[in-house]
Amino acid sequence: MDYILEIESLNAGYNGNVVLENINLRVRENDYIGVIGPNGGGKTTLLKVILGLLKPFSGRILFHGGSVDKTEIGYLPQMSEGDVTFPVTVLDVVLSGLMIRKSVTGRMTRRDRVHAMSVLEELGLGSMAGIPLSELSGGQRQRVFLGRAVIGSPRLLLLDEPGNFVDTGFEMGFYEKLKEFNKSMAILMVSHDVGTISSHVNSFACVNRTLHYHPSGKITNDQLKAYGCPIQLVTHGEVPHTVLQKH
């Protein structure tokens, strides 16, 4: 199977300070990789480098063996309350995901709007197309932003802490939708909630300056320590609980 993304000997950071060191990672078609690690370990920096928002100090990134095509990458960034204050409708937010494919003067067509409505219907938000984004719940807004990320049918979907602001009523439905999208695109999902995403991803990339790839969706505390990822592991059973190391 061909790799759609190859990262080789990558070093990157800010103002000469190294955040990522000797990163190597290969992503296949329809991969579903959980990117985990401590705060400040470089997870978001890795996504920025893949997106071309940050130029690496050295190393290379290949997309289908060539340069990265941003039109084939969907991106769901971390969401904050400030992202929802602008007076824009749900439909317009989803349509904005097509802007990268338009020329400077390009306008949205009727076909674009029909396509955006079909995406909203698939996400269970068709009846909310004309509603201001600010009136939606956290889980609904996150689905809208997911719609914006996938409307262009990307080959690779990057998600940065998608569980933030997702309320309990929407959480399982949100991850089920990701599972559906994974049938047609590879997914790299940054998350601090190892326990929740372990039932969805098929492998892990542990990022803490360096990167250790774990070819399974199951991971233990001992493995996290071995990979240099001192993060908490949340387990889910009849009584959800958190396992913490001594500190």
Image: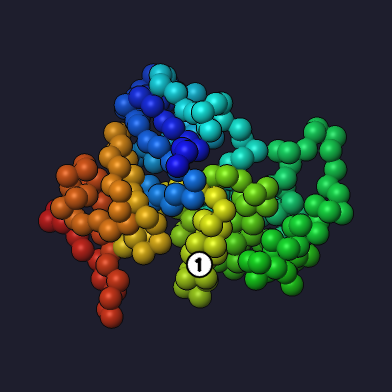
Residue at (53%, 32%) from the top-left corner? 63
Residue linked to disc 1: 176
Would residue 19 be found to the left or right of residue 181 on screen? Answer: left
- Label 1 sits on a secondary structure element that is helix
**Residue 224 visible in image:** yes
Quadrant of the rendered structure where residue 39 is? Answer: top left
Quadrant of the rendered structure where residue 122 is? Answer: bottom right
Amino acid type of disc 1? Glu
The x and y percentages for residue 204 are: 33, 49
Residue at (22%, 49%) from the top-left corner? 224
Within 10 angstroms of label 1, few (less than 14), some, or many (20 or more) residues?
A: few
Q: How many marks?
A: 1
The x and y percentages for residue 66 are: 55, 26
**Residue located farthest toward the left when viewing the structure as drawn:** 246
- Colour scheme of the rendered structure: rainbow
Q: Is residue 161 above or below residue 40?
A: below
Would residue 114 be found to the left or right of residue 151 on screen? Answer: right
**Residue 89 visible in image:** no
The x and y percentages for residue 169 are: 51, 75
Residue at (52%, 56%) from the top-left corner? 182
The x and y percentages for residue 85 are: 66, 55
**Residue located farthest toward the bottom when viewing the structure as drawn:** 238
Residue at (76%, 62%) from the top-left corner? 117
Return the residue nearer the eye: 192 or 172: 172
Q: Is residue 194 above or below residue 29?
A: below
**Residue located farthest toward the front when viewing the structure as drawn:** 1
Picture quarter with the N terminus: top left
